[in-house]
Image (spheres, grey):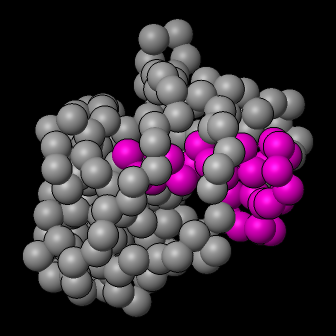
Amino acid sequence: MNEVPFTYDELDEIFRGDGHNDYIGLSAIDGLIAALVAGPETVPPEEWLPSIFADKMPSTVEGHPERRATATILARYAEVEQMLALHPAAYQPIFMHDRGRFIIRPWGLGFMIGLSKRADAWLPVLLSPQRMILKPILAVSEVGRQALPELSDKQIEEIVAVTEVPQIAAAVRAIYTHHANRRRPRKLSTLRRPGRRAP
């Protein structure tokens, strides 16, 4: 896609905007991407991009904001893919923040949306003790909590209370490694990075 991407800050402004466009925000997009990259199967963009753009494929008209937004999203996908494969310690999720505090729930919701794209393929993890790798991620969303039936509401809230960037990043790296040993090798994307990352 020969299109100049937005920066992450610009994309966040576009997606969150006035809150009336039915698009999911940048943090949720980043969670979705993490699940897709770290998941058990490769999911083509045409299957997951509509989840970002109000259940429709984004415009492909040159210069259209949706086309530029797509370029940014695919560049972030390539960035996450390459970091987890080649430099896992460098991987950091993108969270919304408010007054210096990270807001993790939107990212967790996005992760669950990404997981849902290949729910059957995720079942071997979700139905086994391996799901505890994902405990920090599952605990921060209502849907994810259903995969932790052995934990009480109090225990889950205790997990949420101490979950921050390092725990989420570590969980993504761990599940990526778990699936990488089982999935077929895939060629890494070579799309360029779209500029500075939002906090």
Where residue 167 sits: x, y (%)?
Answer: 22, 40
Q: Is residue 135 visible?
A: no
Q: Is residue 183 above or below residue 17?
A: below
Q: Is residue 6 above or below residue 2?
A: above
Depth order, front residue of 90/25: 90
Q: Image point 45% across, 11% down: which residue? A: 100
- Horizontal placement of 5 versus 165: left or right? right
Task: Give the total number of marks visible in the rendering.
Answer: 0
Query: Which residue ends up furthest to the top in the rendered image?
Result: 99
Where residue 78 sits: x, y (%)?
Answer: 41, 52
Read off the magenta span.
50-79
Assign the N terminus to one quadrant of the image.
bottom right
- Horizontal placement of 86 versus 28: left or right? left
Q: Quadrant of residue 4?
A: top right
Q: Image point 80% across, 68% down: which residue? A: 56
Q: Quadrant of residue 133?
A: bottom left
Query: Which residue ends up furthest to the bottom in the rendered image?
Result: 120
Q: Image point 73% across, 39% down: which residue? A: 15
Magenta-drawn stretch contains 63: yes
Query: Which residue ends up furthest to the front in the rendered image?
Result: 2
Q: Is residue 134 visible?
A: yes
Q: Quadrant of residue 39?
A: bottom left
Where residue 31 sits: x, y (%)?
Answer: 46, 51
- Horizontal placement of 98 versus 102: left or right? right
Q: Is residue 31 above or below residue 199?
A: below
Where residue 26 sits: x, y (%)?
Answer: 59, 40
Magenta-drawn stretch contains 7: no
| Dominant SS in magenta | helix
